[in-house]
Amino acid sequence: MSSEGEISSFFESSPPLKNMEEIVEKLNQFINWNFSWQGGRRIVCVTSGGTTVPLEQRCVRYIDNFSSGNRGAASTENFIKAGYAVIFLYRRGTCQPYCRYLPDDPFLECFEFPDKTNNIQVRASHLEAVKMAVMDQQRVAVSERRLLKLPFSTIYEYLQMLRLVATALKDIGPYSMFYLAAAVSDFYVPWESMTEHKIESGSGPLEIRLAQVPKMISILRSNWAPKAFCISFKLETDSKILIEKATKALRKYKVHAVVANELSTRKEEVVVVSSSGNVVVRRDCDKPESIVEDNLIRIIVARHSTYIIESQLLIPST
Ligand code: 9Z3
């Protein structure tokens, strides 16, 4: 387990966030709006996509962690459906809520220029997907103000932003949730030992020593947002060790549940590992449009409801 010293020295040596004041202001406005709305909405921070590890301070090359962002985007849509406000902390360029059905390759295929006038229109084949994306995104993010998107790229940005979100959510305690689906780097090059300029090639093989990224989940649980409901993820490629690893993570980080998934089957099945036992969650194979997140978020929301009730029972009445 990472010590508090390792964690504070990670933050002290990180390049500071360029737009920290702006992020804090957006977070406070979003949380105040949603928590004062008709008695208070629940707020979940969904993390999504992989973090990068730069190899140079003026970064040309970096190490990446695999994640398309599909899980985070689909989960966000389901949390919104369940009435939550969502802080979507996502890797720049990865999958976005309500855009999962749009072609990204190439996106311009959605449009046509039919009559040589200045009118561009959406092709009939993509009309439904584009309409859904625009309408849902407008309604949720703009009219209802229930979706706040915060982008990151590097491990340094991600962890600083997660700390800002946790600190901002501290006061709403059990009504907040962390749903940590981002694929977070385990190893990194400490900023002070990183070369400033592009690493030169042509002088033989490159040797880089990577340090271990301090595990922030335990400090999130113990200090940053101790009353929040917290779900972490465990990804493995070897299904034989998956449940054992997830169970270890559950005990070590004292999260409320760990969602265990194997890389090749992650869209079909996950296992929710918690102190009340393991539950296998699958997508409904008889419904082609069904996704595993529909069933997963239903379970997580029900558990969050129980957690809120139990937390209220713990508060002594006056
Ligand atoms: C996950 O396990 C996510 O479910 C996926 C989703 C990244 C597999 P996609 O974005 O995939 O839909 O393509 N996320 C957590 C991965 C992770 O880094 N977990 C750490 C670990 O396994 C704990 S924080 O040690």
Image: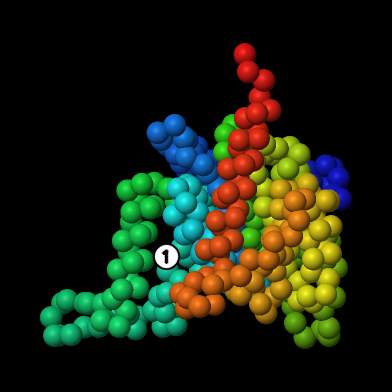
Q: x and y percent of residue 216 in the render?
A: 75, 50
Q: Looking at the image, which residue is at 71% across and 44% down?
A: 220
Can you tell which quarter of the image residue 54 is in?
bottom right
The answer to whether residue 304 shows anywhere in this view is: yes
Give the left or right position of residue 206, taking residue 58 as reference: right
Type of residue at label 1? Tyr
In which quarter of the view is residue 125 placed? bottom left
Q: In the image shown, does 122 or 81 lie closer to the viewer? A: 81
Query: Residue at horizontal 64%, vertical 61%?
Result: 182
Name the residue nearer the viewer: 196 or 79. 79
Judging depth in this view, the residue of 51 and 253 nearest the camera is 253
Q: Name the residue under label 1.
A: 98
Q: Which residue is drawn at 62% across and 42% down?
A: 306
Please name the residue shown 47% across and 35% down the image.
Answer: 40
Classify mark 1: helix, strand or loop. Answer: loop
In which quadrant will I find the C terminus?
A: top right
Badge 1: how crowded within 10 Å, few (<14), some, or many (20+)? some
